[in-house]
Structure formats: C-alpha cells, structure tokens
Image (cartoon, rainbow, N blue to C red):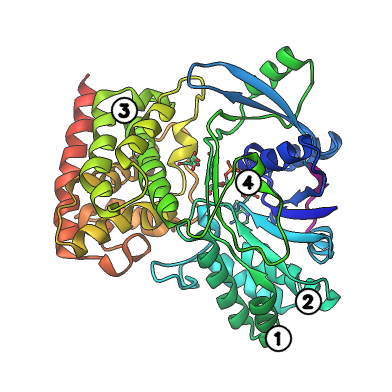
C-alpha cells in the first residue's frame, strides 16, 4: 500500500482530502491510504480520540436545503500522535511506502512576504526553528518539519516524494516550495537542496469545502443518526472541490475517478477561490462581528454587509481577473448562497482569524492589480477598512471571542490602534501591504473606506 503522510490533521483535511481517498477505497481501490499527525502539540484531544477510533470518524455534510448525511471515513489508517522529536512522523516520511507528503498548516504557516521571501524579521518562531534544526532537533514549522523528514528520507534512500500543499494560498505548491528551499539555504545544507530539487515536486492546488470548527452538537447529531459515540466527528457543507496540477513525482491516487480535477494550471481556479470566496468570507466575518452577529450566514443575509461583499467582487475583483475561463459572476452568486446556508453555522470567529496573513495574501493583490491598471479600488478597500475597525475593537477588548492571528505582532497592532492617525499607521504596515505601504492612494482610499465603515458601525450601534 502507498501512503500519503499528512501534516496538520485539522478539520479541513478530514472533511476534504481524506474523503476523496475514502471514496477511492470504497470503490475497491485500496492502493492508497493516509498517515497523519501534527507538527505542533495542538488538538491533543482530537488526535487522541482519532487514535482510539483507529483513525475512523464520522463526517456530517449539509446541503443548501439543510439535508444532513453521515459517512464514516476510513482512509486515515495511521494516526501519528505528537511527540517533541517528531520521530514517528519522520520515520513515516522516510518510509519508501510514503509517496506524497501533504499539508494543511493554515495560511499563517508559510511566513512569506509579498515578494515570496521568508520573513525572518517578522516571525521569530521561524528563526527559532532554524536554530533548533541546526542544533539537530526536529523543526516544528512546516519548513523545519519538512527538513527533518526529507533529510531522513534522503539518508534512507527512500526515493522521490511529492510535496502537496492543501492550504488556501496563492500558487500554494510553488510558494511553499520556495519557502522550503530558502529555509534549506539558510541551513547551508547544499546536499539536501540538490536532493529536494531532483527528488520532489510541488503541484499547485485549489481546495474548497467550508468546514466549520466542529461544535458539540455535531457529535450529538452523529450519535442520534448513527448510534456512534464519535469524539472526532467533523462537519462540512455538501459542496466539495479540488483542482490539482498533475505534477506527481512518485505516483498518485487516481483522484479523477472521484471527481478531482487534474489540470495543467490551477491559476484561474485559485485566483477565483482566493479573491471571490476567501476574501469575501473575511469581509463578511469582520463586518458581521462589528454588526454583532455570531455566524457567517447572519452577515450574509444582512443587506448592507452582503452589498459590501457583492460590490467588492463585482467592482474590483472580477475586472482584474478577466479574461477568465470561469463564469465569475456565477461563481460569486454561488459563493454567497453557500455562505448564506444557516445549517452550516460557521462562526465569524473561525473565518475572521489570521487577518495579518489573509490581507496580504487574499486582499492586497486586488488593490495592487487595480493600482497597476490605474483603476479605482474603493470597493476592495472596504475589506481592510472593516478589519481596521475590528482591530480597534480587539484593542479595546470588545471582540466577543478570542481573536487568533499567528502573523500579527500585538505591539505593532497596538501601535496602529493608538496612533494619532490610525489609518495612516495601518496603511504603513509592511506586513500587510509590502511595497505598497504608505502609498498615497492607498492611504486616501483606505481613509474614505474607513469613514464608510465607521458610519456603518455607528448606524448599527444606534439601531
Ligand atoms: N476549514 C475550511 O473551511 C478550509 C477550507 C479550505 C481550506 N482550508 C485550509 O485548511 C487550513 C486549516 O483549516 P482547518 O479547518 O483544518 O483548521 P484546524 O484549526 O482544524 O487545523 C489547523 C491545523 O493546522 C496546524 N497548524 C496551525 N498552525 C500551524 C503552524 N504555524 N505550523 C504548523 N502547523 C500548524 C494545526 O496543527 C492543525 O493541524 C486553513 O487555514 C486553510 O488554509 C480550510
Ligand atoms: O475563508 C475561510 C476558509 O477556511 C473557507 O472556509 C474555505 O477556504 C472554503 O473552502
């Protein structure tokens, strides 16, 4: 049997990649299975539960009409519990039966700046990881972890392996490969660099299925529907899509038999997904939080919030994506319908997170493209303006949930909020804006957008 070693055994992997392999196995193709674990000591309870359940768990899916279905997923054949030296993960990665190493480590797990350079200055944990790997310890960022695994694989002569990124990141294969090679260069390991260049490929991919953080009621519904006491149940929308560039150096599952689109270039799909779905999702989460909503579907059904999202896509995002083989107006409408499904009950908390990675990765590119073509970017500017208002609430301790942001420097965020001119300070932040930081048109457009956001917030406060 061939293995995919997956790093980052979160909800999304279990509602997406694991489902496709499960479906292949259900068709009788037992040639591939998944081994998975985390690079960090998080989700200990879920990993423990998964291990106790032999890697099996129930997936609940919900259609736009609210119909629910339950499937017991059996493709994760090996659950690798976390240990500090990552020895079991490294051993699995160095096993010749492992032909693909895939990963979901969140958008914040890549540490790249707008020029695709590793941002050592902003992310001290990256430097700490490099030092740990230099000292012969296992790395715990994606790059340090992969170096530990790939060095062991090279030494074991275990052969080529595909590195498959499944995160929402533009050019996700290429960019994470670039980060990995820079990390190896910083280590000064020329032999590993040469081995990686010859023995690995990194296909780009677009992944899609809204997968909320499972709440206790998922397990309750699973129990009621199946009788199974499942401590690792997940839920997602019925919609699912995966488009992958067909660039696998050591073989791959016959994914096309279960609906995966294998293509030469994923670019049109990823741009549509990142700009029309992910950026819009963040818009609704930030605006929805400011308006006092808890769930994404509530903000989606609020006419003012829906208009901000619709105008952003229509006025500013679609024009810079044309020409495009995808019908982008239709894509926009389907996405808004998906967000509006109350049965998904996805929270603003999950979607609002990691803005300091999502703004540069998902929103700034549209501003950059509009600036380059001399176009207006009033509608897209509403998104970062919403986040500035959100950040000010966070600073005032008024966000009604914990805001998580791995890329945010709290001191820099505090300085923005306390500045005499917060808009100018925000527009000057290089983590968010790269080379556009401080650009006059950026400052002025953000200022106008922020005034509109303040009017929206004031109106809601008075309502
Ligand atoms: N949930 C969705 O709707 C969805 C849909 C499409 C794509 N994705 C992608 O999957 C990612 C994870 O989503 P999820 O729902 O599984 O989240 P999750 O919180 O359930 O899991 C996050 C996983 O990432 C790992 N991780 C987090 N930060 C890391 C870091 N800095 N270095 C190494 N590992 C790290 C954790 O160990 C965990 O395994 C998203 O950030 C996104 O890129 C999610
Ligand atoms: O925008 C937040 C994402 O996690 C989103 O749920 C996902 O990308 C949908 O595929």
Mark 4 lies on a secondary structure that is helix
> Dot 1 corresponds to which residue?
191
Residue 388: give x, y in percent of width and height: 29, 47
Mark 1 lies on a secondary structure that is helix
Closer to the eye: label 4 or 3: 4
Nearer to the camera, 291 or 72: 72
Nearer to the camera, 340 or 460: 340
Sequence-first tag of 1 and 2: 2
The residue sitting at the top extreme is 224
Nearer to the camera, 316 or 348: 316
Cα gap from disc 1 to disc 2, whole angstroms: 9 Å
- Left or right, residue 143 beside residue 390: right
The answer to whether residue 286 is seen in the rendering is no
Sequence-first tag of 1 and 3: 1
Residue 279: give x, y in percent of width and height: 37, 45
Residue 185: give x, y in percent of width and height: 59, 82
Label 2 crowding class (10 Å Cα cut-off): few <14, some 14-19, many 20+?
some
> Dot 4 corresponds to which residue?
256
Closer to the eye: label 1 or 4: 4
Cα gap from disc 1 to disc 3, whole angstroms: 55 Å
Q: Are marks 1 and 4 in contact (CB under 8 Å)?
A: no
Cα gap from disc 2 to disc 3, whole angstroms: 53 Å
Nearer to the camera, 366 or 238: 238
Classify mark 4 as within 8 Å of ligand 2 or not, answering yes or no: no
Q: Are marks 1 and 2 in contact (CB under 8 Å)?
A: yes
> Dot 3 corresponds to which residue?
291
- Left or right, residue 446 beside residue 430: left
> Dot 2 corresponds to which residue?
154
Q: Which residues are magenta?
A: 76-85
Sequence-first tag of 1 and 4: 1
């Amino acid at each position: 049997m061939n293995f995919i070693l997956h790093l980052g055994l979160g909800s999304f992997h279990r509602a997406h990649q694991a489902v496709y392999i499960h479906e292949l196995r259900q068709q009788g193709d037992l040639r591939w299975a998944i081994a998975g674990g985390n690079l960090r000591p998080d989700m200990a309870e879920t990993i423990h539960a998964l291990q106790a359940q032999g890697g099996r768990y129930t997936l609940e899916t919900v259609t736009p009409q609210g119909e629910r279905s339950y499937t017991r997923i059996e493709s994760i054949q090996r659950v690798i519990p976390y240990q500090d030296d990552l020895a079991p993960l490294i051993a699995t990665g160095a096993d010749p039966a492992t032909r693909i190493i895939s990963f979901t480590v969140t958008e914040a797990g890549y540490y790249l700046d707008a020029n695709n350079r590793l941002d050592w200055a902003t992310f001290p944990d990256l430097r700490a990881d490099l030092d740990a790997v230099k000292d012969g310890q296992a790395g715990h960022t994606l790059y340090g972890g992969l170096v530990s695994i790939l060095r062991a694989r090279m030494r074991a002569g275990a052969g080529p392996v595909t590195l498959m990124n499944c995160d929402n990141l533009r050019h996700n294969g290429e960019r994470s490969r670039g980060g990995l090679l820079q990390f190896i260069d910083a280590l000064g390991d020329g032999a590993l660099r040469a081995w990686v260049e010859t023995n690995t490929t990194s296909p780009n991919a677009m992944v899609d299925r809204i997968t909320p953080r499972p709440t206790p009621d998922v397990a309750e519904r699973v129990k009621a529907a199946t009788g199974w006491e499942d401590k690792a149940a997940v839920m997602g929308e019925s919609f699912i899509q995966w488009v992958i560039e067909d660039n696998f150096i050591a073989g791959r599952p016959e994914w096309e038999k279960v609906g995966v689109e294998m293509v030469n270039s994923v670019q049109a799909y990823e741009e549509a997904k990142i700009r029309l779905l992910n950026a819009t999702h963040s818009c609704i989460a930030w605006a929805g939080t400011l308006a006092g909503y808890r769930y994404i579907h509530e903000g989606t059904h609020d006419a003012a919030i829906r208009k901000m999202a619709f105008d952003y896509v229509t006025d500013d995002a679609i024009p810079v994506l044309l020409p495009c083989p995808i019908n982008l107006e239709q894509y926009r409408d389907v996405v808004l319908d998906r967000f509006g499904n109350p049965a998904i009950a996805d929270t603003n908390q999950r979607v609002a997170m990691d803005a300091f990675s999502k703004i540069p990765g998902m929103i700034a590119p549209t501003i950059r493209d509009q600036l380059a073509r001399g176009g207006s970017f009033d509608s897209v500017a509403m998104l970062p303006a919403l986040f500035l208002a959100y950040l000010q609430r966070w600073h005032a301790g008024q966000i009604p949930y914990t805001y998580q942001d791995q890329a945010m420097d709290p001191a820099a965020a505090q300085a923005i909020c306390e500045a005499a001119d917060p808009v100018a300070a925000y527009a000057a932040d290089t983590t968010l804006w790269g080379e556009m930081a401080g650009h006059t048109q950026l400052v002025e457009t953000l200022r106008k957008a922020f005034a509109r956001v303040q009017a929206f917030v004031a109106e809601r406060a008075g309502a």
